[in-house]
Amino acid sequence: MGLQDELNRIALENGVQYFGVADLSGPREFIVDQGGEELSAYPYAISIGIRLMDPIVDKITHRNERSALLNYKHHAYDVINSRLDMTTSILSSHIQDNSYSALPIPASKRIDDERICAQFSHKLAAHMSGLGWIGKSCLLITPDNGPRVRWATILTDAPLQPTGSSMENRCGTCNKCVNICPVNAFTGRNFVESESREMRYDAKKCEEHFKEMENSGQIPVCGLCVYVCPHGKKKG
């Protein structure tokens, strides 16, 4: 069994539903701008994703039920992010044991409060490895579970084989995520690689919304764009 197959097996054994490999030679300038020169030295990204639990997501519209909001915050963020970070650590150790370099990127750690971004875009890696497309909500949309997936990434110099290419956008004329947003953070534009995130999404509106909820004693979670996407809804 080759290294890539071993990594895929280990990921699946640790509860991961999505595993992909992306060639990072194309978006080098974007990677440098967001995370610095060091990150651009890695030619490949391993993308892993864990599906959120539908009953947790489906109750996020019950804004007056404290238990629904607590469950979403705990299971859709805290628990899933810990599982992702543990898995990227395990996979990175296995890569290093095979004499290659690996840098696990935290599932959810911001490094730039002004731009409201992390060290590396997990959505970029998942998109370029063929696992989904970036929707009008600026979330990674998978064909089978929509945006109901959390992601993490490992950057590596291990000679891996890319699992796919950027998936074609399938949002079409759907604007459900745009319309449900309580702060009108989305413009409704489809993702275009050459355009900045600000053309589609005002992250500061979401940031202020969370702060207002927290300051008023509410549990600072939203997730409505995750909930409403038809690609994540159960059929029938």
Image (spheres, rainbow, N blue to C red):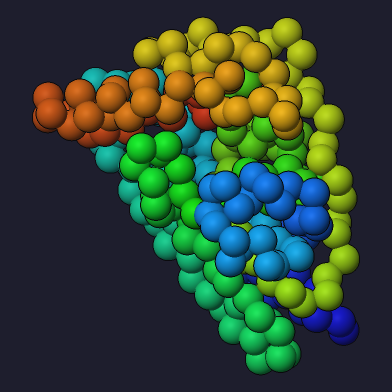
Q: Residue 32, percent across and down? A: 60, 53
**Residue that appears at 80% across and 56% down:** 25
**Residue that appears at 73% across and 8% down:** 173
Task: Report whether 110 appears left or right of 55.
Answer: left
**Residue that appears at 55% across and 12% down:** 187
Q: In the displayed structure, would residue 115 be above or below residue 225?
A: below
Q: In the displayed structure, would residue 184 be above or below residue 200?
A: above
- Is 30 or 68 nearer to us in this picture? 30
- Is 197 or 175 nearer to us in this picture? 197
Q: In the displayed structure, would residue 152 be above or below residue 180?
A: below
Q: Quadrant of the C terminus?
A: top right
Task: Report whether 48 appears left or right of 113.
Answer: right
Q: In the displayed structure, would residue 78 be above or below residue 160?
A: above
Q: Quadrant of residue 69?
A: top left
Q: Residue 151, percent across and down? A: 57, 51
Query: Can you see residue 102?
Result: yes
Q: Quadrant of residue 114?
A: top left
Query: Can you see residue 229?
Result: no
What is the count of numbered marks?
0
Q: Residue 21, percent across and down? A: 77, 60
Q: Residue 156, percent across and down? A: 69, 71
Q: Quadrant of the N terminus?
A: bottom right
**Residue that appears at 54% across and 48% down:** 34
